[in-house]
Amino acid sequence: MAHILAISNQKGGVGKTTTAINLSAALAAQQQRTLVIDLDPQGNASSGLGYPRTDVTMGIYDVLMGFRDLDSVRMPTGLDNLEVVPANRELVGAEIELVEEDEREFRLKKVLDTVRDQYDFIVIDCPPSLGLLTVNAFTAADAVLIPLQAEYYAMEGLGELLRTVQAVRKGLNPTLAREGIVITMADGRNNLCREVESQARELFGAEVFDTVIPRNVRLGEAPSFGKAIVEYDPKSTGAKSYLALAEELLNRRSTKNAALREVS
């Protein structure tokens, strides 16, 4: 049964999509059957996995609106164990169209429930906003993972995101958890980066992953080739970092599952 993970931060440019793509690919490299849902109308996760939004004729929009089932739009990638449901251009108008639909917050959940037993992880790349698409992701997800850029305005807007998580937990998805926070785009030589990381660890403690994702040229290059970093340059610092993050996530999940078994 898949663990459904929403990758979210409404502040743009924090490594959200980079994390969605490369964490998913790293999980797949560790033999985890993984599905990426590109719920961001910009479609960067799709293009980063080989499906530019302008070339996608059917995608997650069609599924949310009930025009297609998931089987007809999920696509293979260049990696074993990794599939993607791409974003198409029509997704831009989905938030407005969904407003008039019944149970609009549960559209994605109902879709993912039909394939949940086919994967180990389903990773949702959320839009850089807290609108109806993100609410759909949070309602469908088991947990939210937050990329946090190591820069001056890193904490700006984080409180609003956490309040949205709490609101969804209260009204739509009572089991929604916070998977944790990942420090991204870090430069260990920069005092400010170290200060931001230290502040995040002081505020959120063990919620912050030990693995830190550094700034890495190869990470920036990989999407232009439609590849995840573990495929584009598996020996790069970026690839090693995301493989380490995937391993840490799997270890956390294993520890939590073991604790739940003891309680039951």
Image (spheres, rainbow, N blue to C red):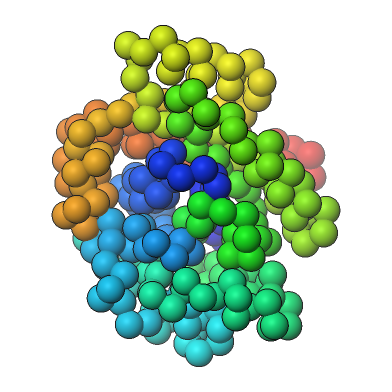
Quarter of the picture holding the N terminus? bottom right
Quadrant assignment, res 117:
bottom right
Quick check: 56 above or below 223?
below
Q: Residue at 25% x, 31% y: name it.
A: 216
Residue 240: x %, y % from top left: 28, 32
Task: Please identify the quarter of the rendering in which residue 18 is found.
Answer: top left
Q: Identify which residue, 118 or 199, lies in the foreground.
A: 199
Can you tell which quarter of the image residue 161 is in? top right
Mark yes or no: residue 253 visible: no
Residue 174 visible to the viewer: yes
Farthest residue, direction bottom: 67
148 sits to left or right of 104? left
Q: Is residue 8 above or below residue 57?
A: above
Residue situated in front as seen by the camera: 231 or 134: 134
State the image coordinates of residue 153 (x, y, percent, origin top left): 52, 28
Q: In the picture, which quadrant includes the C terminus?
A: top right
User: Could you tell whether 37 is left or right of 139 in the image?
Assistant: left
Q: How many marks?
A: 0
Residue 215 image point, x, y percent: 30, 29
- Judging depth in this view, the residue of 32 and 234 nearest the camera is 234
Residue at horizontal 51 percent and vertical 19 percent from the top = 196
Residue drawn where x is 58% and y is 17% of the image: 199
Give the answer, above or below, for where 148 lies relative to 131: above
Give left or right: position of 237 versus 37: left
Q: Residue at x 68, y 77 (%)?
A: 99
Q: Position of residue 10 (x, y in %)?
A: 55, 47
